[in-house]
Image (cartoon, helix red, strand yellow):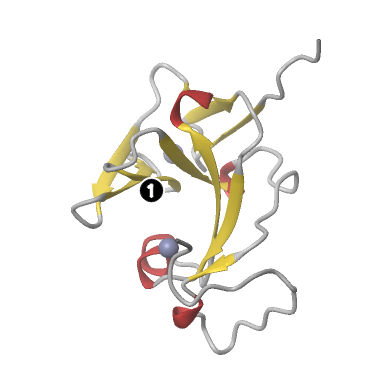
């Protein structure tokens, strides 16, 4: 039997570290204004897991910001790196910033959401599906 795929990642300062025990089941580019403000980047790349597939190092300093009544955005309380995104109404899922991986080239988003907020100077030439708002 194959060993389960594992990858590791963490924040800029190294205080938050995680291991993932499977491949993400989905990955997207999010152009929404909240992601833009919280990351400082024009677009965020997220990968989605079932929550138990993500293991945190014991003393990781992950903190969460309540960006809406339903959404929690996780970041390192030391260096501020964006790391996670989750919905309290869907506690079985957890999204991680692809760029927080140690090998972020390994997984790539294959659709775009909230393109209504895409920066006009951010030219995208891929052929992936585009959703003006969230994907339902
Ligand atoms: Zn950190
Ligand atoms: Zn977003």
| Viewer-nearest residue: 50 or 6 | 50
> Residue at position x 40%, y 26% from top?
60
- Residue furthest bottom in the image: 120
Judge the density around disc 1: few (<14), some (14-19), many (≥20) Cα neighbours within 10 Å.
some
Q: Position of residue 43 (x, y in %)?
A: 53, 68
Q: Position of residue 128 (x, y in %)?
A: 70, 69
> Residue at position x 51%, y 77% from top?
115
> Residue at position x 55%, y 89% from top?
120
Q: Secondary structure at mark 1?
A: loop
Confirm if mark 1 falls within 8 A of ligand 1: yes
- Residue furthest left in the image: 69
- Residue furthest top in the image: 1
| Viewer-nearest residue: 74 or 77 | 74
Residue beneath label 1, please?
A: 80
**Quadrant of picture, ligand 2:** bottom left
| Viewer-nearest residue: 104 or 12 | 104
Q: Position of residue 51 (x, y in %)?
A: 44, 30
56 sits to left or right of 8: left
Q: Is residue 2 visible?
A: yes
Q: Is residue 15 visible?
A: no
Q: Position of residue 118 (x, y in %)?
A: 51, 80
Quadrant into which the N terminus falls: top right
131 sits to left or right of 134: right
136 sits to left or right of 64: right
């Amino acid at each position: 039997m194959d060993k389960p795929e594992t990858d590791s990642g963490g924040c800029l300062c190294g205080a938050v570290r995680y291991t993932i025990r499977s491949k993400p089941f989905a990955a997207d580019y999010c152009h929404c204004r909240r992601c833009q403000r919280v990351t400082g980047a024009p677009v965020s790349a997220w990968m989605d897991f079932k929550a138990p597939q993500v293991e945190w190092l014991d003393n990781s300093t992950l903190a969460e910001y309540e960006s809406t009544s339903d959404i929690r955005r996780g970041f390192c309380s030391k260096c501020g790196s964006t790391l996670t995104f989750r919905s309290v109404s869907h506690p079985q899922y957890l999204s991680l910033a692809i760029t927080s991986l140690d090998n972020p080239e390994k997984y790539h988003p294959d659709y775009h959401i909230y393109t209504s907020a895409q920066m006009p100077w951010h030219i995208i030439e891929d052929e992936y599906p585009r959703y003006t708002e969230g994907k339902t």
